[in-house]
Every structure is written in C-alpha cells, then in structure tokens.
Image: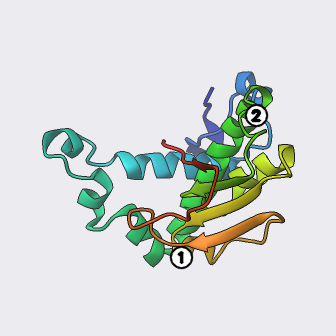
Amino acid sequence: MIEPDVLGDHDMHWARSLALAGRDRVKDLNQSNLEAHEVLDRMLRTNIKHAVLDGSVPFAKANGMTIYEHEDKDPHFSELFNETMFNRTTMYMKKMLENYKGFESINVLVDVGGGHGGILSIILSNYPHIKAINFDLHHVVSKAKTIQGVEFVGGDMFVSVPSGSDAIFMKVY
C-alpha cells in the first residue's frame, strides 16, 4: 500500500504515500497525516526492547522524559502527537459507532486523555444528549478549540479524574 514518490527536482526520494490500491479505502487522509503517524510510531518504538528487559518506559529511556513532559516542552511535537492521535481515533470511532449503541443510555461521559476533544465531537454527533467532559493535561486542553457540548478540564489522570459521570472513556494504542 506504500509506493515510492519522485519529487519535481528529478531526484528520487522515497516518501510514504498511499498506493492506488489503498486510496479508495481511506477517506480524508493526506500525506502529512501519514508522515505524522510514521514519525510518532518511530518515536514511540525507539528502545522498545527496554520495556521487556528492564521494565522501563521506552520513550522516557530514549528522551530522558516522559512523552507528556516532552509534549509540554516541544510545541511542534505536541501538534504532531495530537494530530496523529486525532487521525487514528477518527478512523476507529466512526466505524465503531456504526454498530456500538452503548452510548444511548449515557448522560455524562468523561474522555480521559481526550486530547483536543476529537472523539467526543464524533460521539456527540451521534448522541447529542450527552454532557461530555474532555479530560487531559492542562497544556493539552489549553490549546483545544471550543466544541459545543464539550467541557474541557485539565488535570493529571494519575492523580484524579472528574467524578459524576455515567462512564469513563479511555483509548489505548
């Protein structure tokens, strides 16, 4: 599904892009999305062997800080990280909501680690009755755009999460 690409300067460069066979299967995905996904995957998998050998966190081992600390210190990385998470999530959530009806009975939903609120936006498009709380680190929610029906709350999930919800939503990649 990935093919080489030739740039206009007649030099051969290998670039990630969807091959013709894959283009009809993926909607709303552009070249920068693919690059962001590839870069983030590479960053997250560096030193992965240490997770098995000594139990350390690979990203922290490679960068001397957690991914969340790095995201707070590097705006470009933060943008890349959040764009990639949004694109991965969007693809899965739209498909999931075609069949899953578990949100029908929920009145208050907290998305823990919700980034800029992309998942809640998708859920609310199908279930507008839900009061949605997007919970993520302060530096993440401070950059989020307003989404109707979504309250943004900053904090640390390892300390506490907002209470009073019918359900808590978390994604694991």
Question: Label 2 belongs to which residue?
Answer: 97
Quadrant hosting residue 134 = bottom right
State which tag comes first along the sequence, 2 or 1.
Answer: 2
Q: Which SS class for mark 2?
A: helix
Q: Name the quadrant of the N terminus.
A: top right
Q: Which SS class for mark 1?
A: helix
Front-lying residue, 33 or 127: 127
Asked if labels 1 and 2 touch by Cβ distance under 8 angstroms, the answer is no
Q: How many C-alpha atoms fall within 10 Å of the one at disc 2: few (<14), some, or many (≥20)?
A: some
Q: Which mark is residue 153?
A: none
Relative vertical location of residue 54 with respect to residue 117 in this rendering, above or below: above
Taking the image as drawn, is residue 28 in sight? yes
Question: Label 1 belongs to which residue?
Answer: 138
Indicate left or right for 62 with 128 as reference.
left
State the residue lying farthest toward the top. 21
Image spot of residue 34 (x, y percent): 62, 45
Disc 2 from disc 1: Cα separation = 28 Å
Image spot of residue 86 (x, y percent): 65, 52
Taking the image as drawn, is residue 9 in sight? no
Residue at point 56% right, 62% down? 163
Indicate left or right for 164 with 130 as reference.
left
Image spot of residue 80 (x, y percent): 57, 61
Relative vertical location of residue 123 with respect to residue 3 in this rendering, above or below: below
**Kind of residue sitting beneath label 2:** Leu
